[in-house]
Structures are given as structure tokens and as C-alpha cells.
Amino acid sequence: MTVPARFNGPPGSGNGGWCAGAVAARVGTTGAVEVRLRKPPPLDTAMEVGEQDGWTVATRAGEVVLQARPGAEPEPLAPVAVGTARAAAAAYDGFADHPFGHCFSCGPERAEGDGLRIFPGQVEPGTVAAPWTPHDDHTTLEATWAAIDCAGAWAAGIGERAMVLGSMTAQVLGLPAAGVEHVVVGAVRSVEGRRHRTATTLRTADGDLVAAAEQVWFEIDPTTFG
């Protein structure tokens, strides 16, 4: 399993959602999958995939980078209207200050059609939303996991304190349709010190559920991350 450099999150490492989706695809279930990120996923570097203690694992030099197993079904967030999501995205904090501006999921430095360019803005305290119209090559399972990744961090205030994904449990009911507007929503569930528990949901513009996730984020020092 290799994470192409295009699918980065923080500089030099894979986007957490994309990488989680890639290893989740190896679990062999149509239900929810829990993924834990043990180390920053390397880019353009082959990782071996196997089984270990009930987990599907991706390893590098014998060390576990990602581990996945069937998980509990996440509770979806309530729908947000497309107009509300558009207005929220226009005020995206990441336009002014972004810890990882080239992130595949939420980086404003990515070109249209390259990154997902999902820009979650505040709807109410602790809740963010953004519209998203996938391009043709953004309708994969991995890109869908990436689409329901960073909204959780923006709900938790990543613009004020850098954080990275520690774990993610997601269920994808279907892949998003290219060229069709969707809505991504993120919300904070709880905060315990440096640990932030969040949830994200992807729906069609009509409110039909596409995917849902629950996550744990950890605050980090971006200058020493790696």
C-alpha cells in the first residue's frame, strides 16, 4: 500500500482521512471501520499490509503506521442546508490562517480539481459546514474518507491550534456523485485536554446520507510533527 504524494495532509505525510480509507478498504466489511493512525503515514513509500492481533495493519520497517478493524456505526450529524453551508464556507478561517495549507482535503493552496477544497466555516459554535462538488477522480472510497476528515478539526478549532487525526471510525453508504453538490458538516463532541472528539457527515444537497464518521484529534506542535 502506497500513499501518493498528492494525498498529503501535513507536509511530508499522508492526509489522515485518505490513508484511513485506503486501509479501511482492506478490512473486507460493508459496515463501519475503525482506523487508528499510529505514525504519520509516509508519502510515496510502500507499506506492507497484513493482519496483527485482530487488526488489518499497514507497516513500514516493521512498525505499525495504520491499523483498522470493523467498528461501531457512527451517529450522523443533522443536515445543514446548502445555502447555509455556502455562506459558512465563504467565511472559512483557513483562508486567513491554515496550519497545513496544502492539505488534500481542506487546503486552500490546492488547485481546483486537484485537492478536494472543502472549506468548513462556522454555522454555530462547535459546528461547521461546507458545500462540496466532487470532481471525477474524487469519487473513490479514499477520497470520500478524506471528505469527512478535516471538517472535524475545523469544528474543534484547528485554525487556533494545530492538530492531527489520531483515529477515525467511518461508514460509507455510497460514493458521492461527480459534478453534484454535497454538504459536509463537522461538530465537536467533547474536549479532554489535547484530545478532541468530533463527528462529521457527508450528505447530498437533498439531505440523503452518504457517509458519517467519528474522530479523535490531538493537538500538536506543527514545527516538530513528523
Image (cartoon, rainbow, N blue to C red):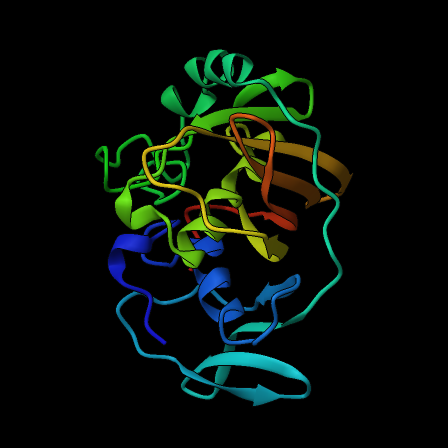
Q: Is residue 225 visible?
A: no
- Quadrant location of the N terminus in the rendered image: bottom left
Query: Where on the picture, by quarter, is residue 189?
Result: top right
> In the figure, is residue 66 to the left or right of 169?
left
Residue drawn at 56 percent across, 26 percent down: 206
Q: How many labels does the image show?
A: 0
94 and 105: which is toward the camera:
105
Q: Position of residue 34 (x, y in %)?
A: 65, 64
In the rendered image, the vertical position of residue 65 relative to residue 48, given as above or below: above
Q: Is residue 88 above or below residue 21?
A: above
Q: Residue at x 38, y 58 (%)?
A: 14
Position in image of residue 144 (x %, y %): 46, 49
Q: Along the line of sight, which residue is nearer the eye, 194 or 49?
A: 49
**Picture residue at 69% right of the left edge, 19% below the top:** 125
- Is residue 153 depicted above or below 46 in this figure? above
| Image point (42%, 65%), residue name | 41
Q: Quadrant of the C terminus?
A: bottom left
Residue 7 lies, in percent from the top left, at 32, 54
Residue 133, percent across and down? Answer: 37, 32
Which residue is more in the foreground, 5 or 222?
5
Q: Quadrant of residue 171?
A: bottom right
Residue 48 visible? yes
Rendered view: 26 above or below 175:
below
